[in-house]
Amino acid sequence: MKALKIKNLCKTYIVNKKQNNVLRNINFEIEQGEMVAIMGPSGSGKTTLLYTVSGMDTITAGSIDFFGKELNNLSDNEISKVRLDEMGFVFQQMYMLKNLSVYDNIILPAYQSSKEKDNRKNINEYAIKLMHKLGISEIADNDINEVSGGQLQRACICRSLINKPKIIFADEPTGALNRQSSSEVMKIFNKINEEGTSIMLVTHDLKVAAKCERILYIEDGNIKNEIYLGKCSEEALRERERKLSNWLMELGW
């Protein structure tokens, strides 16, 4: 089954009475269980694409099919429910509520969701399991300003998984991290993907993109090209990076 089917997607902003066509007739699909990176120059429309296909921003024209649901035909409330129950989000800026502990931030979306609203015991147990899996059990009770950037991003990934989403959308998820933390976060994403969750991420980092199954290259609001690398294996990582680097150079990246 297709996780996403995007057809003739357009996004236009009006700025100072001038029309700015940020996305122009975008067409692509993401398979269930696939991990896809979006790359391209600054201002090419990468983040706008992620925001529109996930329903966080409206589209000007076209259609977005999310696991058989036409997102563009849903009401705002219906889209909000889909985002809460069936999508997970990870951003470069690690948005967490400052008055809550790390653990409370992680469980909050599940308490807001209708999926397990009558069984908070299950939610709490799953949050503990996720934190253990991602190696941050020891910071559960910490305030968010008492942990490192790498720990906080892992907590954000836990939060994105708490409602067992069908897909995770990530915008520069390693952008604020050092190389070691970035590598650790990508290993987590690869493991999540191996377990069946689809992932679409925006990145400018070649090393991050090389760990994805497929890379789409966007320029001037159009998808210009794509490359298929297959599922990631650590043994072939250098070869994947070399292949991706050569491909990007050919595209003038």
Image (cartoon, rainbow, N blue to C red):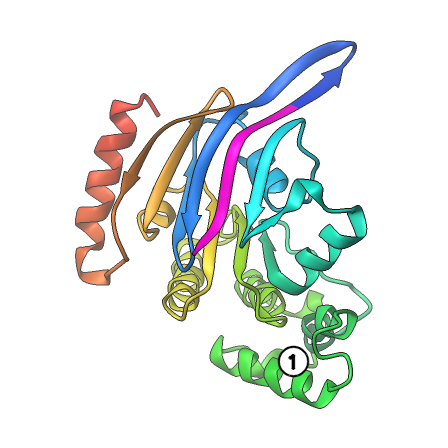
- In the rendered view, does 96 fall on the left or right side of 169? right
Q: Which residue is mark 1?
A: 140
- The residue sitting at 58% across, 83% down in the picture is 138
Q: Does residue 188 sit above or below 198 in this rendering?
A: below
* Kind of residue at disc 1: Ala
The residue stretch that appears in magenta: 1-11
Residue at the (51%, 47%) spot, across then down:
175
245 falls in the magenta region: no
- Relative depth, front residue between 120 and 140: 120
What type of secondary structure mainly makes up the magenta span? strand
Left or right, residue 234 beside residue 206: left
Height in image: 101 above or below 69? below
For image coordinates 59% across by 22% down, the residue present is 22
When the figure is inspected, residue 235 is found, relative to residue 163, above or below; the finding is: above
At which x and y percent is residue 127? 62, 80
Residue 104 position within the rendered picture, expressed as x and y whole percent measured from the top left: 74, 76
Q: Residue at x 26, y 39 (%)?
A: 244
Q: Residue 70: x and y, percent?
A: 62, 45
Mark 1 lies on a secondary structure that is: loop
Q: Is residue 125 left or right of residue 3?
A: right
Is residue 3 found inside the magenta-colored segment of the image? yes
Q: Nearer the viewer, residue 9 or 112?
A: 9
